[in-house]
């Protein structure tokens, strides 16, 4: 196993090679926290029925949203998942403009900008996209993250200390500069690209069929381990020269 461990760890910078994952950091993190605070304010004002009515009357045809079911969102408001929060991030400012304090509304406006920026599938000019202050070019990622942190500090200062996902946002520009658009290293994208195989099925515990995809990291680790266990060979690049790592070498 020592050759496998050295092969995996060699050349890896754990801080730079583990990018911030936007599904859990943004949708199931920042957006979920703001949704919880917003629902608390609306419930306290007994305006939840009004919020649901506005959702029902919302025209979402041009937003490319999945099934938007206001009754479900309001009834199960404490158990929503990523696709719900992605939809809410795009429409919340139109629904709550007179139901919440201005700071909370400003927070949702910035969240909408952040989600649009992060779900880019391609970036024409990476430095302009990541820029902090670009005159006459609108909001960009670093500036939008700063605005969100400033507004969050006004709405709920303690959450910046108790929830580390707000801190993770600060590192997103560095990871995008290194790896490209954040959607490329989103867990949703990795899960969608995971395929089934006989090897996957053989690793499942029990006699039930596999109903969920194997995590991509586990898949890559097992795929790397297989040729070594089977006394095979694996190419390894080191200092520009192609070397061969054989099973059982030290």
Image (spheres, rainbow, N blue to C red):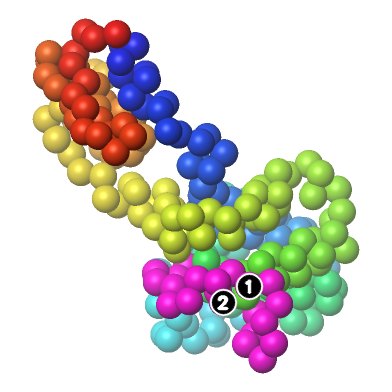
Neighbour tally class for label 1: few under 14, some 14-19, many 20 plus, Cα within 10 Å: some
The residue indicated by pointer 2 is 128
Q: Position of residue 177 (x, y in %)?
A: 51, 60
Magenta residues, as a range?
A: 119-139
Circle 2 sits in a helix, a strand or a loop, which is it?
helix
- Above or below for 66 versus 226: below
Circle 1 sits in a helix, a strand or a loop, which is it?
loop
**What residue is rendered at 63% in x and 72% in y?**
131
**What residue is rendered at 19% in x and 13% in y?**
247
Residue sitting farthest toward the bottom: 136
Is 31 inside the magenta-drawn segment? no
Residue 92 visible in rendering: no
Q: Is residue 81 left or right of residue 216?
A: right
Q: Quadrant of residue 242?
A: top left
Q: Nearer the viewer, residue 246 or 14?
A: 246
Q: Position of residue 176 (x, y in %)?
A: 51, 59
Q: Quadrant of residue 106?
A: bottom right
Q: Position of residue 4 (x, y in %)?
A: 31, 19
Q: Mark 2 and mark 1 in contact? Answer it, CB < 8 Å.
A: yes
Is 121 inside the magenta-drawn segment? yes
Residue 173 visible in rendering: yes
How many labels were placed on the picture? Answer: 2
- Above or below for 173 versus 50: above
Neighbour tally class for label 2: few under 14, some 14-19, many 20 plus, Cα within 10 Å: some
The residue indicated by pointer 1 is 131
Q: Is residue 72 left or right of residue 190?
A: right
**What residue is rendered at 48% in x and 42% in y?**
17
- Above or below for 217 versus 27: above
């Amino acid at each position: 196993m020592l050759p496998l461990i050295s092969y995996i760890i060699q050349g890896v910078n754990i801080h730079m090679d583990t990018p911030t994952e936007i599904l859990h950091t943004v949708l199931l993190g920042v957006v979920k926290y703001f949704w919880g605070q917003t629902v608390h304010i609306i419930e306290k004002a007994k305006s939840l029925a009004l919020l649901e009515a506005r959702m029902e009357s919302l025209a979402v045809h041009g937003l490319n949203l999945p099934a938007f079911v206001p009754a479900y969102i309001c009834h199960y408001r404490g158990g929503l998942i990523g696709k719900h929060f992605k939809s809410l991030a795009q429409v919340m400012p139109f629904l709550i403009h007179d139901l919440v304090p201005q700071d909370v509304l400003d927070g949702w406006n910035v969240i909408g900008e952040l989600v649009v920026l992060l779900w880019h599938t391609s970036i024409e000019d990476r430095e302009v996209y990541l820029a902090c202050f670009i005159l006459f070019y609108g909001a960009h990622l670093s500036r939008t993250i700063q605005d969100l942190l400033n507004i969050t500090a006004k709405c709920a200062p303690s959450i910046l200390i108790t929830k580390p996902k707000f801190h993770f946002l600060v590192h997103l520009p560095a990871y995008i500069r290194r790896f490209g658009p954040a959607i490329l290293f989103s867990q949703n994208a990795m899960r969608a690209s995971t395929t089934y195989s006989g090897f996957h099925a053989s690793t499942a515990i029990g006699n039930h069929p596999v109903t969920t995809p194997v995590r991509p990291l586990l898949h890559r680790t097992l795929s790397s381990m297989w040729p070594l266990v089977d006394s095979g060979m694996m190419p390894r690049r080191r200092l520009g020269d192609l070397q061969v790592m054989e099973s059982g070498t030290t």
